[in-house]
Image (cartoon, grey):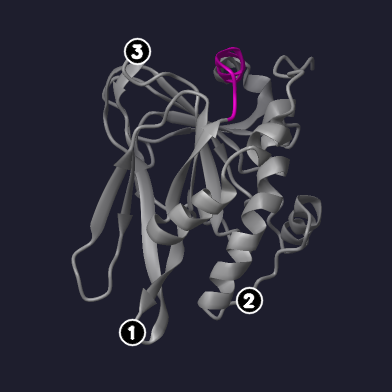
Amino acid sequence: MTDTTRSASQVADRVAADDWDALTAELDEHGNALTGPLLTPAECRRIAGLYDETGRFRTTIDMARYRFGSGQYRYFTHDLPDLVRELREAFYPRLLPIARDWARKLNRPAPWPDTLEEWLAMCHEAGQATSAQILLRYGPGDWNALHRDVFGDMLFPLQVVVGLDAPGEDFTGGEFIMTEQRPRAQSRGSSTTLPKGHGLIFTTRDRPVASKRGWANGPMRHGVSTVRSGHRHTLGLVFHDAS
């Protein structure tokens, strides 16, 4: 199959060009952080256009059927488009120090090796050998319920969603939402408007929260608010595979 998403630009350079000290501080404080531009408008259109190339995907999920919300998403096969693969490979080493630091603060194992290839091999050996990279499409009235993308015991604590359409132009509504369960307090919510071509790094399951006794676990969930008009496509990069 011919790959139509290959770009002459260097995806790794775009990821590296971000202010990673600022992104790390934002993740530590809020559990999510908005990146600079990762994809050009043309690259966004190409990736969104892959949605109708069903041979690229292993399965399609109708969210209403499973009571996940409303809308549809598709899981890529392991034969990823070049841009998707390059983005994932570029992010892993940048996110790895944050993942290890969070594990240290929460007194948890940090099983992640230095390379994504080694980590995915560990996932496969543990029975998690199915691709978890996602292309999502929402139309008017669609939304995504609050959830976590935990597909087994082999878990990477951070993931990335990339906006492929322009909010306010291609669609309205559809904000990325997160809730944080706070100890002995009401849950706290946040929302992010995801610009076209930008990414949002966010916690897969939880994050360390400073407390009087050291570090506590702050459980978090994510979802998408109702799309009011137009169509919203996003690319989901998950750094562990599914069982």
**Disc nearest the viewer among 3 and 2:** 3
**Residue designated by label 3:** 169
Measured in 3D between alpha carbons, the distance from the residue under mark 3 to the one under mark 2, in whole angstroms, is: 44 Å
Query: Helix, strand or loop at disc 2?
Result: loop
> What residue did someone put label 1 on?
212
Q: Earlier in the sequence, mark 1 or mark 2?
A: 2
- Which of the two residues, 70 or 172, is positioned nearer the viewer here? 172
Q: Position of residue 224 (x, y in %)?
A: 34, 37
In the image, the segment drawn in magenta is: 38-47
Which of 76/31 is in front?
A: 31
Q: Is residue 169 above or below residue 225?
A: above
Q: Is residue 55 left or right of residue 113?
A: left
Crowding near the residue tagged with mark 2, few <14, some 14–19, many ≥20 C-alpha atoms within 10 Å? few
> Which residue is tagged 2?
109
As drawn, the label of residue 104 is: none
Amino acid type indicated by mark 1 = Lys
Mark 3 vs 1, N-terminal side: 3
Residue at image coords 68%, 25%: 56
